Image (tube, helix red, strand yellow):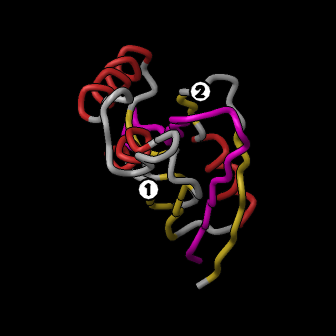
Amino acid sequence: MRIHNDYLTVQTKQKREFQNITENVKHAMEKSGITEGMVLVAVLHPNSAVFLNEDEPGLIQDAEQWLEQIAPVNHEYMHGSKFESNAAIHLQSLLLGSQVIVAINAGHLELGPWQQVIYAELDGTRPKRILIKVMGE
């Protein structure tokens, strides 16, 4: 089995922003030369997330509202209670997830008709790293 690591650095313009990174994942797969296997996409920060779904503006707005309902920013949390807390953001990251795996079949990402790899920046405009690990033959 061969393994190829790529790192994507993302810096958003807004504190909360969703970006379609499917093309970046495809590029890493193509660069690896691996045609059968899988790609692991993992965010390397606890205040961001990655998930598979449609890249549709209404769905993204629904996701933002859902995250705020489940883990509201203005709630009192135990995490960071003595200082400025970003506990809600960490909990929101747990809801969306920190990694996805996409199969590679005959040199193509095995995604459903509407599926895309979506990066979610949940708290900030600092540079964040994403690991794209391609594994297979």
Q: Is residue 132 above or below residue 16?
A: below
Q: Residue furthest top?
A: 58
- Give the number of callouts: 2
Label 2: few (<14), some (14–19) or many (≥20) C-alpha neighbours in 10 Å: few
From which residue to which does the magenta span run? 112-137
Is residue 93 left or right of 47 when viewed as pictured?
Answer: left
Q: Residue at x 68, y 32 (%)?
A: 125
Q: Amino acid at mark 2?
A: Lys
Is residue 77 left or right of 107 when viewed as pictured?
Answer: left
Q: Please tell me which residue lies in front, 86 or 68.
A: 86
Q: Which residue is mark 2?
A: 15
| Residues at discs 1 and 2 in contact (Cβ within 8 Å) | no
Whole-percent x, y for residue 10 in the image: 70, 41
Q: Amino acid at mark 1?
A: Val
Q: Secondary structure at mark 1?
A: strand
Q: CA distance from mark 1 to mark 2?
A: 23 Å
Q: Please tell me which residue lies in front, 106 or 56.
A: 56
Whole-percent x, y for residue 119 in the image: 53, 40
Q: Is residue 125 magenta?
A: yes
The C terminus, quarter of image: bottom right
Whole-percent x, y for residue 132 in the image: 62, 60
Q: Residue at x 69, y 71 (%)?
A: 4
Q: Is residue 47 above or below residue 101?
A: above
Is residue 59 left or right of 1 when viewed as pictured?
Answer: left
The N terminus, quarter of image: bottom right
Q: Is tag 1's residue or tag 2's residue first in the polypeptide sequence?
A: 2
Q: Which residue is mark 1?
A: 100
Q: Secondary structure at mark 2?
A: loop
Q: Residue at x 71, y 61 (%)?
A: 6
Q: Please tell me which residue lies in front, 108 or 43.
A: 43
Q: Is residue 93 above or below residue 113?
A: below
